[in-house]
Image: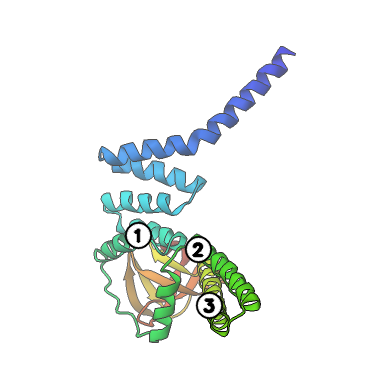
Amino acid sequence: MKRHIFVILLALFTLSAQASSPAETKTLADSAYVRGDFEKAVKLYDQLAQQTPTADVCYNLGCAYYRTDDIAHSILWFERALKLDPSNKDIVHNLELARTKTIDKIIPQHEFILFTYFRNLTNWLSLRTWTWVGLLSFALMLVSLLIFWGAGSIIKRKVAFSSAIFMLVVTCLANVCGWQQRAFKQTHSSGIVTAPAVTVKSTPADNGNDLFVLHEGSKVEILDASLKEWCEVSIADGKQGWIPKKAFDLI
């Protein structure tokens, strides 16, 4: 009987320790970063990211990697943080700062301006905020309709109807932006080159023709990942080719 009680208490103690582990790890990681022990901070933030990969944790890990001059992994974790919170200006700023330290200076192809505006609008607010905007605007639309149906004067009915139409547009826009942001979070179609350098091939083979070279920190878009060891990728200027999967990490 005593043995069973001991086992139960031990199990409860273990679960309690595991439950408090993320908070303790976060405190230790923050302390290591503040006192300049960035190698330890990387280790602790990485451990925390495996447990609770929030935007803040990914961002802190990116900052710690940046302090150790590991620019490739710094960009990787900034990109992962941005995927979780695309409206965070600090993440955007530090990501751009890290990119200035990469070797490859890739000039993106021109994008249709409406796509750029829509992406900026989508990333203007967080997913949670877009959700609240959609719910609030939908509720205000219903209130406007009630006022429209119950109003006696023509002016009130016109104002209420116009408000209902406006709130309908805002509701639809918030839902589209939220859906787009959620889809972006769940899609893993890009990666960061973490190898010091990789030669992009014309075919998925070591004896394929050399097309160009990418260095650590460069971002690639995945076109075909069906092969076991090779992946077809493209970069922002439109160039395409094949690289080994081990040369990059998914965002």
In the rendered view, does 30 fall on the left or right side of 185? left
Mark 1 belongs to which amino acid?
Ile
Residue 205 in sight in this render: no
* Residue beneath disc 1: 91
Residue 49 location in percent, x, y?
46, 48
Identify the mark nearer the N-term, 3 or 1.
Answer: 1
Quadrant for residue 226, please give it: bottom right
Q: Between marks 2 and 3, how big is the CA–CA gap?
A: 24 Å
Mark 3 belongs to which amino acid?
Ser
Identify the mark nearer the N-term, 2 or 3.
Answer: 2
Q: Residue at x 62, y 75 (%)?
A: 145
Where disc 2 sits, the SS reads: helix
Front disc: 2 or 3: 3
Colour pattern: rainbow
Identify the mark nearer the N-term, 2 or 1.
Answer: 1
Task: Decide: is 133 above or below 233.
Answer: above
Residue 242 location in percent, x, y?
45, 75
Q: Between marks 3 and 1, how big is the CA–CA gap?
A: 36 Å
* Residue beneath disc 3: 163
Front disc: 2 or 1: 2
Q: Residue at x 24, y 66 (%)?
A: 100
Task: Decide: is 126 above or below 106.
Answer: above
Q: Residue at x 56, y 80 (%)?
A: 165
Is the C terminus in the top left, top right, bottom left or bottom right quadrant?
Answer: bottom left
Q: Between marks 2 and 1, how big is the CA–CA gap?
A: 16 Å
* Residue beneath disc 2: 127
